[in-house]
Image (tube, rainbow, N blue to C red):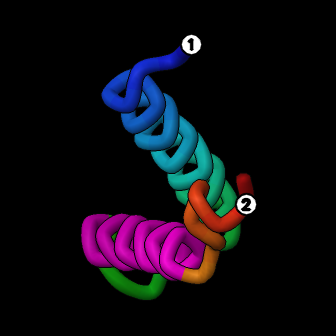
Amino acid sequence: MIGFESLLEQEEELLAKVAQIAYGAVLKRGLARPFIEVELEIWDEIRASYVARLTKAPALAEVA
């Protein structure tokens, strides 16, 4: 069984990988502003989407 902390670490790694892919795609298209601003905006959006999905997901007790 996977521990809660291990699961959180895996989720953070997944979010970081998604962000890395997004950074690469953005860099290929070119930037009109500093990369650090774009990088932070991408991370914030990915994180917000993830948190929004978590809040909409049914609780484990409701599924069982």
Q: Which residue is drawn at 51% across and 17% down?
A: 2
Q: Residue at x 68, y 60 (%)?
A: 25
Q: Where is residue 20 in the image (x, y as percent from the top left)?
A: 54, 46
In this view, the residue farthest toward the right is 63
Q: Which amino acid does label 1 sit on?
A: Met
* Secondary structure of residue under mark 1: loop
Q: Please tell me how many numbered marks the rendered image carries.
A: 2
Q: Residue at x 59, y 75 (%)?
A: 53
Distance of mark 2 from mark 1, alpha carbons? 18 Å
| Quadrant location of the N terminus in the rendered image | top right
Q: Are marks 2 and 1 in contact (CB under 8 Å)?
A: no
Q: Which of 15 and 32 is in front in this view?
A: 15
Q: Name the residue under label 1.
A: 1
Q: Main secondary structure of the magenta part?
A: helix
Residue 63 is labelled as 2
Q: Which amino acid does label 2 sit on?
A: Val
Residue 25 visible in image: yes
Range covered by the magenta-colored residues? 36-55
Q: Position of residue 12 (x, y in %)?
A: 42, 41
> In the picture provided, is 4 more to the left or to the right than 37?
right
Residue 42 visible in image: no
